[in-house]
Image (tube, rainbow, N blue to C red):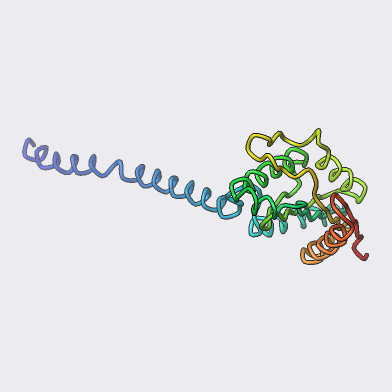
């Protein structure tokens, strides 16, 4: 009997050595999953402003579009371009330009709702997608963003923080395609820029 006990002791020790392995494996999988989530979020965000980038916008649009269509609701898409942004980069340097973009991103998120999509498509071009929003409500939002009272103080980091921007609004039923929303909003934006600074032009999507 003593011989049997001594023979099983090494097996018990070996079992105790490998027992933690499943737990270690689960912990490693959890860490990898967290890293994957972080990488996915990072890939969908503009590193400078923290807003959605084009890839993140495309992904979120597909989800939001389905919700809006099922709710049979109106939607609005706003294309925004900062007025006189290029001279800031040219005269004050890219650090000042970056500070302006970051401050403007704060202004956007502070005035938009949680369900709205706020994205930076590149340079000083921003896109807002507003579910359940009429043309009048979209224009009211643009005016709030434009109001100096709703503008974060950026005098310390960006003395030339632009006070104005041009905006183009596409509005209509949610059934329109993503490409239609962006194309009509861009057309409206170009019309606004031709009209001068701090202008807003709205175009309804064909039913």
Residue 16's place in the image compared with 79, above or below, is: above
Residue located farthest toward the front when viewing the structure as drawn = 91
Judged left or right of residue 200, residue 157 is left
- Residue at 40%, 45% (x, y): give it: 26
Q: Could you tell me if residue 26 is visible in this image?
A: yes
Which residue is at 77% across, 57% downward? 65
Pinpoint residue 54: horizontal percent, then vertical percent: 66, 59
Where residue 36 appears, as percent x and y from the top left, is 49, 52
- In this rendering, does residue 50 appear at all? no
In the picture, residue 61 is in which quadrant?
A: bottom right
Quarter of the image with the C terminus is bottom right
Q: Residue at x 71, y 33 (%)?
A: 153
In this view, the residue farthest toward the left is 3
Seen in the picture, residue 194 relative to 1 is either above or below; the reply is below
- Looking at the picture, how far across and down is residue 190, in whole percent? 83, 62
Would residue 187 be found to the left or right of residue 19 on screen?
right
Q: Quadrant of the N terminus?
A: top left
Q: Nearer the viewer, residue 149 or 8?
A: 149
């Amino acid at each position: 009997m003593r011989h049997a006990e001594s023979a099983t002791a090494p097996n018990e020790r070996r079992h105790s050595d490998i027992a933690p392995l499943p737990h270690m494996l689960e912990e490693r999988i959890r860490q990898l999953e967290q890293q994957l989530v972080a990488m996915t979020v990072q890939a969908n965000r503009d590193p400078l402003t923290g807003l959605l980038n084009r890839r993140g916008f495309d992904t979120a649009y597909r989800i939001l579009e389905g919700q809006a269509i099922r709710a049979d609701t109106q939607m609005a898409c706003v294309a925004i371009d900062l007025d006189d942004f290029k001279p800031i980069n040219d005269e004050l340097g890219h650090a000042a330009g970056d500070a302006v973009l970051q401050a403007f991103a704060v202004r956007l998120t502070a005035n938009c709702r949680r369900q709205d999509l706020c994205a930076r498509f590149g340079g000083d071009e921003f896109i807002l997608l507003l579910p359940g929003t009429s043309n009048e409500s979209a224009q009211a939002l643009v005016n709030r963003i434009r109001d100096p009272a709703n503008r974060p103080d950026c005098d310390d980091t960006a003395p030339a923080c632009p006070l104005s921007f041009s905006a183009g609004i596409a509005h209509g039923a949610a059934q329109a395609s993503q490409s239609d929303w962006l194309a009509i909003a861009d057309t409206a934006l170009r019309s606004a820029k031709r009209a001068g600074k701090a202008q807003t032009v709205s175009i309804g999507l064909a039913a």
